[in-house]
Amino acid sequence: EKHYHPRFPRHRLHFPISVLFSCSRSMPFIPLLAEVGTELGTYATIHKKLKSIYSKKRGGLKQSIFIQLIYNRFIRDDLDEESSGKLDELSTAIMMRLKEKVLMVKEEIYGYDLTNLLLYNANYGPNYRYDQRLRFLMDWDPSILAECGRNNPLLYHYVHRLCSTDGGKIPRNAIQRFGTILEFGMSHYPNELGFLFHRSTLLTACENFGSEEVSRIIDEKLSVVLGQRHNQNRNRNESSNADTNNNSSGNSSTSLSLQAMMFAAATNDKISINGVYTLFRRDPMALLPQGSLQAAI
């Protein structure tokens, strides 16, 4: 049933589920109301109504249940850094619950532009925490990293459009978001090196953040991703009862993973020579054949 909420302008209609967004204490009831609405056959109707009711005349930004979990526009809590982190955790938990109940599907991440909206809002909220929601969205639909809805990889779109305010300024912590996207990209698309070396992505990132900072981030994220692949290989070896030697096999596994990435980069015409050089500089020994590498170790 539609009703007016005293904290919102009276010229706007609100459904009970939309009012829950005004307070973090009431937000945990969102999945319950969504589930009840589904049983009554009203959830889909409410969802469509919300999209059409909350629309900015200038920006054309349509608010939906999922967008509110990203945007947090109606929240009336006083958000400092700690409470914003709790809101990020809460919003993520709600989306996970909606996913479990099949009240939120993967296609809606792309359809409602949730990832881009999350990164855009991070530029303007001084205490806006987004880490857990970003991880949830990217792990659920990694394809958004390759095509974010702008006919470009997400990292390309971020460094060209989303890492600056409307005034052209680089916001605080923008380079941290750059590193987060790069890490996800390298984890899910290692053969593309996270799309960093596609077109002008690297050049623009260096112009925005400085070449030294970008190089530091690249080395840091490469270490993380190679470490993850090493752990995965080690777990597979342990599960198959293969003979392992902690020191030698660990170095070999990491080098072979780097060798595979280097080969993929060298044979991918979309990756610039900078990508191959970055990997080679990290460990020139990775170019050696497997037998020679093990002998050298």
Image: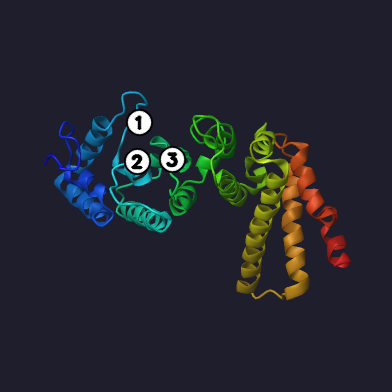
- Residue 275 is left or right of residue 228, and the answer is right
User: Residue at left 69%, top 41%?
Assistant: 210
* Residue that badge 1 annotates: 61
**Which residue: 44% across, 42% down?**
118
The local crowd at label 2, few if under 14, some if 14 to 19, many if 20 or more residues have their Cα within 10 Å, is many
For label 3, the residue is 121
Mark 3, residues whose alpha carbon is within 10 Å: few (<14), some, or many (≥20)?
A: some
Q: Earlier in the sequence, mark 3 or mark 2?
A: 2
CA separation in Å, label 3 and label 1: 13 Å
Mark 2 to mark 1: distance in Å? 10 Å
Mark toward the start of the polypeptide (3 vs 1): 1
- For the point 54% across and 44% down, which residue is it? 172
64 vs 202, left or right, is left
- Image quarter hosting the N terminus: top left
Q: Position of residue 265 (x, y in %)?
A: 73, 43
Q: Quadrant of the image for the C terminus? A: bottom right
Q: Amino acid at mark 1?
A: Leu
Tell me the SS state at disc 1.
loop
Q: Position of residue 70 (x, y in %)?
A: 38, 44
The amino acid pointed to by label 2 is: Ile
Which residue lies at the image location 34% right of the left edge and 45% below the top edge? 72
Name which quarter of the figure residue 45 lies in.
Answer: top left
Under mark 3, the amino acid is Asn
- Specify the label residue 135 is tagged with: none
Secondary structure of residue under mark 3? helix
Q: Is mark 3 in CB contact (under 8 Å) with mark 1?
A: no
Label 1 near label 2: C-beta < 8 Å?
yes
Please name the residue that numbered disc 2 is placed on. 67
Whole-angstrom CA distance, mark 3 to mark 2, is 11 Å
Left or right of 294: which side holds 94?
Answer: left
Q: Position of residue 36 (x, y in %)?
A: 18, 51
Q: Residue 75: x and y, percent?
A: 29, 47
